[in-house]
Image (cartoon, rainbow, N blue to C red):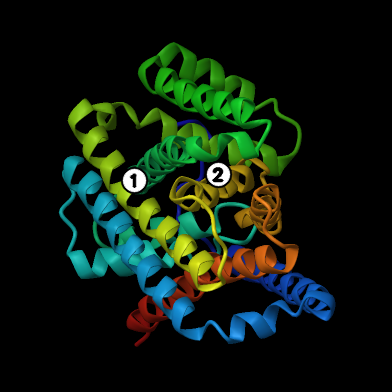
Amino acid sequence: MAEGTSLTSPAPVRRGRALGWLSVIAVVYVVALWYVDRDKHVLSRLSQLAAPLCGCVVLVLCSYLVRYQRWHTVLRAQGHRVPWRSGLYAYLAGFAFTASPGKAGELLRIRYFSRLGVPASTTLATFVYERALDLLVITALSAAAARLVPLFGVLSAVVLALVLALCVLACWPGLQRLAAALVSRLPGAGVRRLARFLLGGAQDLRPLLAPGLTSVSALYGAVAWLLTSLAFAWLCLALGIEVSWQHALSIYPLAMLVGALSFVPGGVGTTEAAIVLMLGALGVATDAALAVAIGIRLASLWLAVAVGMLAMASLEARTKP
């Protein structure tokens, strides 16, 4: 592991800071919804879509189960057989702070998986592996909507360069030492902390790069993201938005890719804007596009936060005397 990489359980202060940031982002999001709703009446349209939104929630929850099964499979490949249900709670807890800056949610996974006998380094490596595969999967799923984003080629190149760099770093010890030295010279404690976090995970990736495991893990990722894409397509259909099935299944992954590469926590705002712009390019009215964007984010990002908070509360309650 890189020197100075912190793999300990998150301290209460760190969790408190993350909760504070999450609260601020949530308040800003609600205020933005109120501002947009004044002219577009988005919330009133969403209130009429209770049944489709519930269906979207079911699909997204199923995607969480598929994503956890991938996580469980990767842990088993590393020699860690955790109880399925206990591991599920630990995995879901990682969603609690997904919309806050930093990696507090993933640090929570380190905290809870360590109670199941999984070393912090293993949890960190599994996280980096999962994220790298997700970037590749959503890039592939986004291809059908590539013409809606002029910079898709650049985004794809960035993703491929990042994943390739991780693979090279995982397999080349000399490069790991050089990277650790460079990270220690980066300006800003926050930047160095994030770089060490990623470097620590990359260093333990090599055993996970087996073709068989990677193929199975990528398949799990594709199924999970397709379930969320189906939720998006369902919401479009419920609002009477007519788009081709290729666009219906590709717009949300591409919006997520834009949000991820914007480095905004949880892609808040940037993902919604990308959805509205892409639907607008297909001739969809702004108010309908906004309703879809906000609806799918309520049923995905903010659902993830709520599920993560419940899982975290349940796990913390079990540790109290």
Q: Of the residues under marks 1 and 2, which one precedes in the sequence?
A: 1
User: Where in the figure is residue 248, as x and y percent of width and height?
Assistant: 49, 53
Q: Residue at x 26, y 50 (%)?
A: 70
Name above or below for residue 316 compared with residue 87.
below
Q: Is residue 11 above or below residue 188?
A: below
Instruction: Please tell me which residue lies in front, 174 or 268.
Output: 268
Instruction: Determine the secondary structure under disc 2.
Output: helix
Whether residue 191 can be seen here = yes
Identified at 25% across, 61% down, the residue is: 116
- Left or right: 225 as drawn, with respect to 115: right
> Is 130 situated above or below 19?
above
Residue 152 badge: none
Which of the pair 5/282 is nearer the observer?
Answer: 282
Q: Position of residue 291 (x, y in %)?
A: 65, 70
Q: Mark 2 is on which residue type?
A: Leu
Mark 1–mark 2 Cα distance, whole angstroms, equals 14 Å
Horizontal and vertical percent position of residue 243: 53, 54
Q: Which residue is mark 1?
A: 222
Q: Secondary structure at mark 1?
A: helix
The quadrant in which the C terminus is found is bottom left
In the drawing, what numbered circle is on residue 254?
A: 2
- Give percent across and percent down for residue 96: 50, 68
Task: Answer whether residue 300 is visible to the viewer in this image.
Answer: no
Residue type beneath disc 1: Ala
Q: Residue furthest top?
A: 174
Q: Quadrant of the N terminus?
A: top left
* Above or below 11: residue 7: above
Of 289 and 110, the residue lying toward us: 289
Residue drawn at x 44%, y 42% is: 131
Q: Are marks 1 and 2 in contact (CB under 8 Å)?
A: no
